[in-house]
Amino acid sequence: MSLSTEQAAFLLDACKLIQYATEQGFVVTGGELARTPEQQAIYFKTGRSKTMDSIHLKRCAIDLNFFKNGKIIWSKEILAPLGAYWETLHPKNRWGGNFSNLVDCPHFERVPAP
C-alpha cells in the first residue's frame, strides 16, 4: 500500500474517531498532524519525543485536544475508551496511551508499511 493510500485511510479513521468522541460528549480540537524533521529534532532533544522516527513525519499520526466542560482532558483513564475505539478501527492503529516507553494520550497513529 502506498504512503498516500495509508494517509488517506488514516484520515478517514481520524474522522471516525472525532465523530465518536463528539458523540461521547467531548469537544475535539486539532493538535499536530504533519511534523518537519527539524521540529522532530527539537522534540527529541527536549525529551518531548523518544524517537527521531515519528509517525508524524509520514503524516500518519495526529495529536488531538479533548475538552469536557471547557477543560482539557489529559487523563489516560478518561481517554482510554477513545483509544480502545481507535484501535478497533484498524489493526495498524495505535493509541499513545498504550505506548510502553511514553504515555501520550492525545496521540493517535496508523503505522504505515516501511
Image: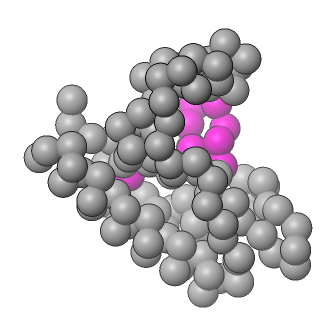
Q: Is residue 23 visible?
A: yes
Kindly identify the residue that appears in the image at 62 percent across and 81 percent down: 22
Residue 97 is covered by the magenta coloring? yes
In front of the other: 95 or 45 = 45
Kindly identify the residue that appears in the image at 87 percent across and 74 percent down: 70
Quadrant of image for the C terminus: top left
Q: What percent of the width, then of the height, locates residue 3?
A: 21, 43
Kindly identify the residue that appears in the image at 57 percent across and 17 percent down: 41
Depicted 114 relative to depicted 103: above or below: above
**Is 64 displayed left or right of 26 in the figure?**
left
Q: Which residues are magenta?
A: 93-105
Q: What percent of the width, then of the height, locates residue 61?
A: 45, 46
Q: What percent of the width, then of the height, locates residue 30?
A: 61, 61
Residue 23 is covered by the magenta coloring? no
**Is 10 displayed left or right of 44 in the figure?**
left
In front of the other: 100 or 53 = 53
Kindly identify the residue that appears in the image at 81 percent across and 75 percent down: 68
Depicted 16 relative to depicted 112: above or below: below
Q: Quadrant of residue 67?
A: bottom right
Depicted 98 relative to depicted 11: above or below: above
Depicted 62 relative to depicted 54: above or below: below
In front of the other: 105 or 15 = 15
**Is 15 displayed left or right of 45 in the figure?**
left
